[in-house]
Amino acid sequence: HLRTATRVLLRLGEFHAVSFPEFRRKAGLLPWESYLAAQRPIAFRVSCHKSRLYHSGAVAERLAGAIADRLGRSPVVQAFRDSHDPHPPQLIIARLVRDHCTISLDTSGTALFRRGYRQATAKAPLRETLAAALLMLSGWDRRSPLMDPFCGSGTIVIEAALLARNRAPGLSRRFAFMDWPDFEASLWRRLVDEARKQEIPEAPPILASDKHPGALRAARANADRAGVGEDIEFARRPVSAVQPPPEPGWVVSNLPYGIRTRSDADLRQVYVQFGRVLRERFPGWRVTVLAGKRHLLRCAGAPLQEHGWINNGGVRVLLAQGTVSR
């Protein structure tokens, strides 16, 4: 049911170490056999800060040696790349801060924002975890209408439908812990069955629009893969032609940034139109948006309060919220 985290880590152990022999000996005391199956490749992510063991590569080498000492065999070590591979190597994370070492195992495998449905993309896509966080921050009650007038590949409205239906985002994907020797498949199947029984059969009105036909095709395909295609009303139209339903609700959107999509001059007009549409047609609606630049957001002239900058796939974007006056 976790919607906003990128990974879930299991703390395997922690200890003090100021030399490589001490580090290898203490790391070798950890119960690696409970988590590393035979022939399962592993990968390391090591960081060192203000510690006498400051070389991350040397720490990773000793950690591999400690695992070999414990298991009686040398592990297969690979580089870790965050990709769509459903069977990535088991990621082991070691952090040294002021000579204190913390060792954790990644339970997730492929990053949790990879739900499996977003295979078709539009320009400047939004990660699923950030879309879910945006919806939660908006305060959406999951009963009122929700609209995204710049839906792109549909991530916000798809996550909204999953949230409204109380559908767990990880039902149909694999996790790293499934390859652990102590994994109980029958218990996992029971948990999945319980999660499915908690689903809600219907969603409130969820409306998505975009003026680009390619974006709409991608959004529809992604929604169908997520199993919520019938919960979302898609329409091809520019923001100037957007019409809300009679009942007030929420606008949640990832506004165009201009970094990868269009010029700054064009964007100013888009933001002006967006603000005008909000003021004229959306009285009483609550608004939560991400914007690429502060001056563009101000062009909208909408009652939106800035709540700080966040990171979307390496791009800094501004979070803003407000309620349109009646």
Image: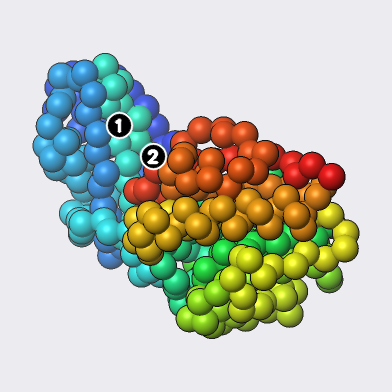
Q: Name the amino acid type tagged 1.
A: Arg
Q: Name the amino acid type tagged 2.
A: Ser
Which residue appears at 16% of the width and 25% of the height? 53
Q: Residues within 10 Å of mark 1 (few under 14, many from 20)?
A: some
User: Could you tell me how many numbered marks the image carries?
Assistant: 2
Q: Is residue 34 above or below residue 244?
A: above
Disc 1 from disc 2: Cα separation: 9 Å
The residue identified by callout 2 is: 104
The residue identified by callout 1 is: 95
Rendered location of residue 176, percent (x, y): 44, 59
Q: Is residue 214 above or below residue 13?
A: below
Of residue 164 and residue 145, the one placed in the foreground of this image is: 145
Q: Quadrant of the C terminus?
A: top right
Evaluate whether residue 155 shows in this view. Answer: yes
> Is disc 2 placed on a helix, strand or loop?
strand
* Picture quadrant where residue 169 is located: bottom right
Q: Is residue 219 above or below residue 55?
A: below
Asked whether, in this view, residue 80 is left or right of residue 273, the answer is left
